[in-house]
Image (cartoon, rainbow, N blue to C red):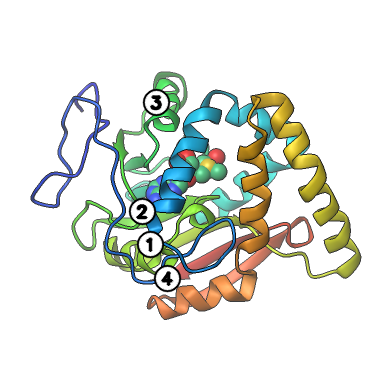
Amino acid sequence: MPDDLIAEKSAAGTPSADAGRAAVPEATAASHAVDTATGAEAEAQVSMDRARSIFTKIARRYSLFNALSSFGIYKVWLRRTVKRAQAKPTDEVLDLAAGTGDVTYRICRDTPPARIACTDFTPAMLDIAKSRQVAESNGVPLEFMVVDAQDIPYPDESFDLVTIAYGIRNIPDREKALSEAYRVLRPGGRFVILEFSTPSNPVWRVLYHAYLNVMIPFIGGLLTHDRPGFVYLKNSINAFPDQEGLASLLRAAGFDRVTYENCTGGITAIHQAIK
Ligand SMILES: C[S@@+](CC[C@H](N)C(=O)[O-])C[C@H]1O[C@@H](n2cnc3c(N)ncnc32)[C@H](O)[C@@H]1O
């Protein structure tokens, strides 16, 4: 594998192994783009520029924030997601919005597949993922690529498993991203989504929202000196569809056997769907 595989989509629409830093993708012709902070209809570029700017700023402290703000539960949710994904030794895996690589490396550790494409559209996040490769890949061949999940530069039916953790909420055209995941999966392939969701118990929901709306901007601001980034985080969680809403989007994208499982009373949910 080439040393530097942070590549960009080639003109032909297939990934190139360009050794240089990729151009950051621009918004594609979106069908149902929303402002990811409000849920209102808006140009995709607004949300994409904001997400890229936020994740570029917080990349170095992203893991620390995750661990502290979730009291470590984040790792439990992650492990459960990877267990549900059940990667097999022969599987080719695509990790979308992979950020600093937590899902990728957890798969490498727990259920090593044939290869993983570790992708994200913020180069600063992917740089950190790449820096973990030697210590954490467990011998699994990895490729790192700057990819917009709304316009995936792989041919149809290239993967057995597609994962996305805390990514779909940040994507303005969710229909497009889900149909792209569907397109690149082989028939029978699995799509697994880990995302913040909506607690069903009203008391738990009130407590959680109090924590989310007050403490998350406070802790995030303290750790990263980027309070607006964490105001965005809580707004995007508040604006994101609940468990059933996301399940409906998956069915509309063509997926079969759509199921979900709540974690910590529905603060997050793991959705699974089959092509
Ligand atoms: C909250 S982080 C999640 C990272 C990682 N999956 C994890 O579980 O830690 C969200 C990631 O989504 C990425 N992202 C946002 N919009 C995206 C898009 N349109 N395509 C691909 N990645 C995107 C951001 O760059 C960021 O790295």
Label placed on residue 177: 1
Instruction: Using the rendered view, name the quadrant where residue 40 is placed.
Output: bottom right
Q: Earlier in the sequence, mark 2 or mark 4?
A: 2
Percent of width and height locating residue 257: 49, 77
Location of mark 4 (residue): 274
Tell me which corner region of the image, top left, top right, bottom left or bottom right, holds residue 72: top right
Work out whether 26 lies above or below 4: below
Q: Secondary structure at mark 2?
A: loop
Cα–Cα span, label 4 and label 3:
31 Å
In the image, residue 147 sits, relative to residue 61, either above or below, namely below
- What residue is shown with label 2? 149
The reply to whether the residue tagged 1 has its Cβ within 8 angstroms of ligand 1 is yes
CB-based contact (under 8 Å), mark 2 and mark 1: yes
- Tell me, yes or no, whether the two marked residues, 3 and 1, touch with CB atoms within 8 Å: no
Q: Viewer-nearest of labels 4 and 3?
A: 3
**Residue 86 seen in this snapshot:** no
- 220 and 89: which is toward the camera: 220
In primary-sequence order, the first of circles 4 and 3 is 3
**What is the spatial separation of the Cα atoms under label 2 and label 3, in whole angstroms?**
18 Å
Q: Can you identify the residue that label 3 sits on?
A: 127
Instruction: Locate the N terminus and report the quarter of the image it occupies.
Output: top left
The residue sitting at 47% across, 31% down in the picture is 56
Mark 4, secondary structure of its residue: strand
The answer to which of marks 4 and 1 sits earlier in the sequence is: 1
Dot 3 lies on which element?
helix
Task: Residue type at mark 4: give it.
Answer: Ile
Residue at 62% across, 47% down: 232
| Circles 2, 4 touching at the beta carbon (< 8 Å) | no
Q: CA distance from mark 3 to mark 1?
A: 23 Å
